Image (cartoon, rainbow, N blue to C red):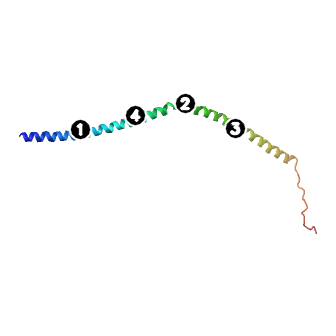
């Protein structure tokens, strides 16, 4: 009977030793995962701490670009108006000043 109890205790001890080994390995993996997550969190905090400054700079740059774009748009409109006036003046000039094409003599052709 004692042999059965000793065998049972040894098998239980070996089983629990295996369970303890698995728990220790899990603890090591969790510690490594915790370290990786902490490092990632530090990088995210560093990145996000600079975000308000970057957002503000980008907003100011966007406002400058919008202002410049508006000025260029107005300049383009002004140039289009000038071009339209030139074409209108040309059209009016062609109507009222009708330049007749005088036939030029062909050089080197006999008129006989």
Q: Looking at the image, which residue is at 57% across and 30% down?
A: 56
The residue at which mark 3 appears reads as 72
Cα gap from disc 1 to disc 2, whole angstroms: 51 Å
Is the residue marked by circle 3 packed among few (<14), some (14-19), or many (20+) residues within 10 Å?
Answer: few
Nearer-the-camera pick, 80 or 28: 28
Q: Splitting the image into 4 quarters, where does residue 73 fall?
A: top right
Position of residue 98 relative to residue 107, above or below, is: above
- Reading the chain from its start, which is encountered first: label 1 or label 2? 1
- Reading the chain from its start, which is encountered first: label 3 or label 2? 2
Nearer-the-camera pick, 61 or 22: 22
Cα gap from disc 4 to disc 3, whole angstroms: 50 Å
Q: Splitting the image into 4 quarters, where does residue 106 fall?
A: bottom right
Q: Looking at the image, which residue is at 82% across and 46% down?
A: 90
**Camera-side mark, 3 or 2:** 2
Residues at discs 2 and 4 in contact (Cβ within 8 Å): no
The residue at which mark 4 appears reads as 38
**Camera-side mark, 4 or 3:** 4
**Camera-side mark, 1 or 3:** 1
Cα gap from disc 4 to disc 1, whole angstroms: 27 Å
Q: Splitting the image into 4 quarters, where does residue 74 fall?
A: top right
The furthest residue to the right: 112
The residue at which mark 1 appears reads as 20
Cα gap from disc 1 to disc 3, whole angstroms: 74 Å
Image position of 80 (left or right of 12): right
Q: Residue 15: x percent and y percent?
A: 19, 41
Image position of 95 (left or right of 12): right
Nearer-the-camera pick, 92 or 10: 10
Image position of 61 (left or right of 9): right
- Reading the chain from its start, which is encountered first: label 4 or label 3? 4
């Amino acid at each position: 009977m004692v042999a059965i109890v000793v065998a049972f205790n040894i098998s239980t001890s070996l089983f629990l030793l295996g369970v303890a080994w698995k728990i220790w390995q899990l603890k090591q993996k969790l510690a490594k995962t915790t370290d990786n997550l902490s490092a990632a969190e530090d990088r995210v905090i560093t990145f996000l701490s600079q975000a308000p400054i970057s957002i503000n700079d980008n907003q100011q740059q966007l406002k400058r670009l919008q202002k410049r774009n508006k000025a260029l748009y107005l300049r383009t409109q002004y140039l289009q108006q000038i071009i339209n006036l030139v074409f209108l003046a040309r059209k009016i000039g062609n109507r009222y000043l009708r330049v007749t094409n005088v036939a030029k003599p062909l050089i080197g052709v006999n008129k006989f």
